[in-house]
Amino acid sequence: MAGPESGAQDASSQRQTIALTEGWQFNLIGPYDDQGNLAALQPDNWEAVSIPHTWNRVGYYRSDPETHVNTPDNVDKTQGVGYYYARFAAPQLVGGERLFLEFDAVSRTAELWLNDTRIGENRNPFGRFRIDVTDQIRSGQANDLYVKVDNTQPALGNSTADVLPMTGDFFVRGGIYRPARLVVTQPVHFDMLDHGGSGVYAATTSLSGDRATISVSGRISNSTDSAAPVTVVASLLDDAGRVVGSWQQDTSVPAGETAELEGEFDVASPHLWNGVADPYLHTLRFELQGSDGTVIDSIDQDFGIREMKLDPERGFLLNGRPYQLRGAGFHQDTEASDWAVSREEIDESLRILLDMGANSIRLSHYQHGSPVHELADRYGIVLWDEIGLVTAWTNARDQVDAPAGIVENARQQLRDLVHQNYNHASVAVWGIANEVDFGPGRPDFLGRPPEVIADPMPLLNNLAALSRELDPTRAVVIANCCEERGMEEVPIVANAVDAVGVNRYFGWYYGEPDQLGDHLDALRAKHPDKPLSVSEFGAGGSANMHTDNPLGGPVEKAGRTQPEEYQTWFHEENWRELAGRDYLWGIWPWNAFDFGTTVRAEGDAQDINTKGLVTYDREIRKDAFYFYRANWSDRPTVHIQGRRYVDRAYPVTDVRVNSNAPSTTLIVNGMALDTMDDCDLNVCVWSDVELAEGKNEIVARGRFAGETVEDAIEWRLDEGQADTFRIDSGTVLAAEAPVQFGSDDFFVGGTAGSTDQPGGWGRDPIPAEIADTDRRGVVASFRQGDFSYRIPAASGRYRVTLTFVEPDQPSGARLFDVAANGRTVLSSYDVAARAGGTLSAVSESFDVEVPGDMLELEFSPVAGEAIVSSVEVVPAE
């Protein structure tokens, strides 16, 4: 079952590594029953699999399923137990070598048997673990390995009750979802049982002038029955292989024990690791030499010389200079492979974010694997690492304190995280928790809040102290949700850490985007000594849902109505608040990619969080992606928004272009329109652009120094839409009807409303029964208040039809006038009286002459509020 590494020596060591990739069999037992019993293995249920592997497949798009991997028929959200079995040939051990089983991650828990002997377990779903199997292995023979894997949802008293995360807006998959291997070492070796780490560590502890100081340490294990005299040599090599700094020390490791050595060395005129601009990497080489000078173990790792600090005034400092971190949150799943992602898939994801202009990633909400850290080192991407402590830290409704098992699991995850990623230049901070400060206001999708509100501070203080003990060179951080949000009994978790990230959704779950800046300033004033960042902000955006005006009606934060254009508007307006606040040490929109979760039924997706700037399959970079690219990247960017909204509803529309060009020109059907310079937020807007019947070629051309960059798309306008405006009032997504309507647009003032009861969090909306209409979906929504429509109709004569539905007011309670270009056409109009009651549609039509390319319809209240459900403007015959 050996993979491509079979029998190979590590590139820089005396170790032998054998990949355990092929030849596995898998048997999914499934959930425990109500009594906690587990079904027996079924002999006929084994299937051949390769590692990495997960038995789960989560989330699918409801639209165009033929273009996607996931469908309702192949998703699998089973939580429970699966067994893996492999028979493998072990190498011949002839000189006292040690043999280790190494798994990069198994979720949630792993229990292992080798040759009918239980050899151990692991209860961290996200970290690497190793087991010394030298005494159980059949050297040079076939061996039988069973791995019991359990991803049962944690609950009091069950098999995973103490395994974080307890809950969260993502799904914890089951499986051996990262690579596994055998590793053979010499009897004396760098410690293989150091919390999954390499056993050797280095950090830049001083950087001044033309000199850097590197501290180093190494743990040496001696499995022999006599003391082992050894020499440890640590060297730093530049990219030409020249040694630029070194340290060595002699020691004698007692029999059966592990010794730790520490030292430091200086590097003159160091070439620094400087983020995406210059991610220069040295090679850090640790050698373990025997008494005769023979190298008996060695480890090579990439290492960047750099200094990272956080300052409450200047933000993030890289090598002494302000360097604001910009990127996105990142979950590890893809539609193609779910959690069993390959290094190539991870590389693709990182390249997409680099193309956006990101220089940082927040690795959410758990420890990610080695590939993303190694690639981040090489690309210069600064990382926020964190453990799986998310939202909840108890599993019974009456628990006030975190149970001891959960505390220890959190500490294990933190120890594993730090030991396994300590040497990576890319890692800037250690995150100890995400959104554990809801207090009693926990979100609906997480279920009922507990009977008592547990205090997270003892656990957070415990973890913060452990983090500083493990690594005093990196800041301890937390992402909070709720401080200064007007919620009661919110713990101030910022007090536990060195620096803070805030997850804030103004304009999505609450408030408006223009409230974000003042909110951040208030937090900064409250905690002047705590460097502040924005660790999450985002909105759902479905690439197959489109609106003519993102403010035309309500979006559904937990429902189906999530057009892509609203997501774009949200990010534009939030960035307006963030762009000038240089004290923020980092800004991470949520999320880089759509990801799988089993608590959402939103947009055009099921079990997918649609806040990604890129789709789950990595195929569509949404318009918001290009907004950030135009603002964050130095690469020439010209991108026309709305390219997936092809069949247009209106003959006149705004054209919005993301451009970082000094000047940008729009060409519509071969005719050049105005050239724009220095567009606000690098979004150039051409208003009231006229479309022709049929195909329309839209070209945006940006002129940069030495080159011209252009983007071209095609929009279509059907014959029935030419010179016609059919407006579905009060909605951001036009309803289907016998003729095409557009979403609410061209309005000034008023508010949107609906006769229907909204859905959300998996609940479908409840539609109202509306009489006297074949356009129920159109007339169910409305605009009300004191408002007008300014419709850019070409000069000519039009028939205007207004449709009304009274949602709840009796006759006489709502009276209003309607005027067309200043002429009153309806006076003291009473919808309920005219329709004979509530929830019945009634229409009024009139002709109007439009002399100057603008039709203004004014709706003026006489009593109560004016209202309209749809507006139709068509050329008069």
Image (cartoon, rainbow, N blue to C red):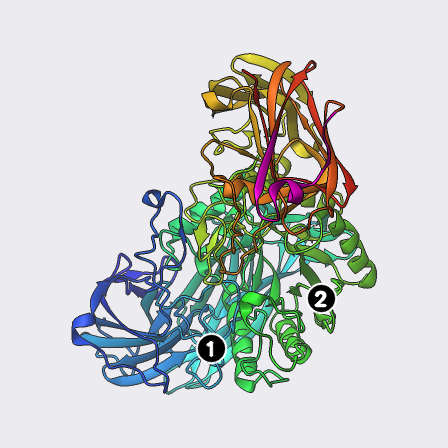
Instruction: Tell me which segment is drawn in magenta.
Output: 824-844
**Dots 1 and 2: beta carbons under 8 Å?**
no
Q: Is residue 464 above or below residue 534?
A: below
Q: Earlier in the sequence, mark 1 or mark 2?
A: 1
Measured as percent of width and height from the top left, residue 667 is found at 56, 17
Circle 2 packing at 10 Å, graded few (<14), some (14-19), many (20+), is some
Numbered tag placed on residue 154 in the rendering: 1
Q: Is residue 637 visible?
A: no
Q: Quadrant of residue 14?
A: bottom left
Asked if the stretch drawn in magenta spans residue 469, the answer is no
Q: Look at the numbered disc 1 and give the secondary structure of its residue.
A: loop
Looking at the rendered image, the quarter that the C terminus falls into is top right
Q: CA distance from mark 1 to mark 2?
A: 30 Å
Measured as percent of width and height from the top left, residue 79 is found at 38, 71
Q: Nearer the viewer, mark 1 or mark 2?
A: 1
**Left or right of residue 31, residue 271 in this image:** right
Q: Which residue is mark 2?
A: 498
Amino acid type, label 1? Pro
The residue lying toward the viewer, choosing from 337 and 640, is 640
Q: Is residue 336 visible?
A: yes
Q: Is residue 840 above or below residue 418?
A: above
Circle 1 packing at 10 Å, graded few (<14), some (14-19), many (20+), is some
Measured as percent of width and height from the top left, residue 834 is found at 64, 40
